[in-house]
Amino acid sequence: MAKNKTIFTCQKCGSQSAKWLGKCPDCNSWNSFVEEDYAYPSSGKPKERAALYKEEPVLLKDVQIKESNRIQTDIVELDRVLGGGIVKGSVVLVGGDPGIGKSTISLQISNQLSQKGHTVLYVSGEESVAQTKLRAARLGHTGSGGLLYIVNQTDLSLIAEHINKLKPELVIIDSIQVVFEPSISSSAGSVSQVRECAGILTQLAKTTATTIFLIGHVTKEGTIAGPRVLEHIVDTVLYFEGDRFSAYRILRAVKNRFGSTNEIGVFEMGSEGLKEVSNPSEIFLSERPKNVSGSVVVAVLEGSRPLLVEIQALVSRSSFGYARRRAEGFDFNRLSLLVAVLEKRIGLSLEAEDIFVNVAGGIKIEDPSADLAVALAISSAFRDQPVLEGLMVLGEVGLAGEIRSVTQAASRINEAEKLGFKHCILPANSLKNLNTKFKKIELTPVATLKAAIDIASGQAVKSK
């Protein structure tokens, strides 16, 4: 008989204690310990599991890597984020808000690969087989001509049996929070269950070369529910960003052992599922108003892809005792820094003004090259004066009001030129290192923020 004991587990980091603690000693979170009844597995099961995953050590020089180690899904945006396709034997965790498209993209991947001759097993723990069929039909997937198996199951031991029997190349677990290991007495979704199930599935993927996609729920803070160790166990962590009430979704890799974590994929949610957006810059700028103050376009770099987005700013007199600062899609601390530079170096009186900054399209910007665009948008909104028509800007703003150089300026300018922009303000050092010649866009180098504001406000732009 398995012995039971009561343990307390931190829901944030997975730390365990024999007694309840008000504050976690590892992650310093308060009131995060929950009581769980843990049952030791029977003496026979660990031996069986060890024998199942037994593998002899091999020399590194003897390991053979085949060129077909990646599986192409033919969903270009997804393949880009994954680093060129799905790596066989990898474990991918997909997280995001409810209704944002996690199950939809998983079903589309399953259909695409099954139509190419790959065996796929879709494990739906939250929907019946009939409900999954209805959702597939809504997306236009009939399953004919492919090897796509669907099962409604939450027992991990039975899921492992299905995998060993069918030997699929891809397994979708929807979702990891509803799967449970029978030898652990705690309920599904608890820290112990999520950690144990993810560990077993990862071992199964590595030893059988089966790719496993895990769909994960998120908490109200936006992080994946369960212990933080879940993200450490898997090979790739993908997050869906964007408002679920908006049509556009952004798929971002926050961890990828087989590719870059800087790439993003842009999708549009429609009645037939997620559709790829081949030119996201044009989409993000399609509704941009003309001759309106506080609107500036910047070219940010997401991995190897330059992306043109609109920075919007609104400055109004504060009606309260203190001025408010709000930022959507841009770092709030960076916004406070830029406001301080505008007050100190440029002389704008912003201490009694409410300042709101928004990145149109729901995208989140981490590229420092957007500093100049945010500063120009705030200045334009404060003076109620639109910037030069057809203008795109680049540059990082320093504390002294200087404009610092950005990386890969040529690819950013080339993207702006393709979309018909006529003027570009960029750091002087970036122009010196620019080897490419542009015929349809005028380049104006600046060294200070004041010079950039003067030019953007309507002075003549000189081509260099």
Image: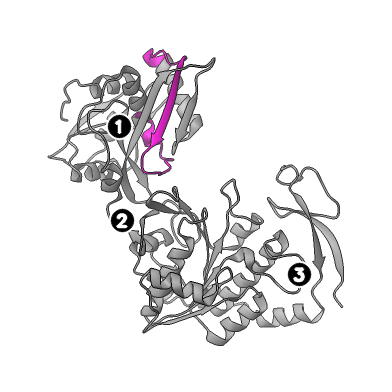
What residue lies at 62% left-to-right and 83% top-to-bottom?
A: 161
Tell me the kind of residue under disc 2: Val
**Foreground residue among 462 and 178:** 178
Which quarter of the picture shows residue 251?
Answer: bottom left
**Residue 95 colored in magenta in the image:** no
From which residue to which does the magenta span run? Answer: 344-372
Question: In the picture shown, does residue 103 fall above or below 376?
Answer: below
- Circle 2 is placed at which residue position? 277
- Circle 3 is placed at which residue position? 184
Tell me the kind of residue under disc 1: Val
Query: How many numbered marks are there?
Result: 3
What residue lies at 30% left-to-right and 50% top-to-bottom?
A: 280
Task: Compute the Cα span from label 1 to label 3.
Answer: 56 Å
Tell me the kind of residue under disc 3: Ile
**Residue 355 colored in magenta in the image:** yes
- Circle 1 is placed at which residue position? 296
What residue lies at 42% left-to-right and 41% top-to-bottom?
A: 365
Mark 2 crowdedness (10 Å alpha carbons): few <14, some 14-19, many ≥20: some
**Foreground residue among 127 and 169:** 127
Q: Secondary structure at mark 2?
A: loop
Image-based side of 257 in relation to 117, left or right:
right
**Foreground residue among 98 and 279:** 98
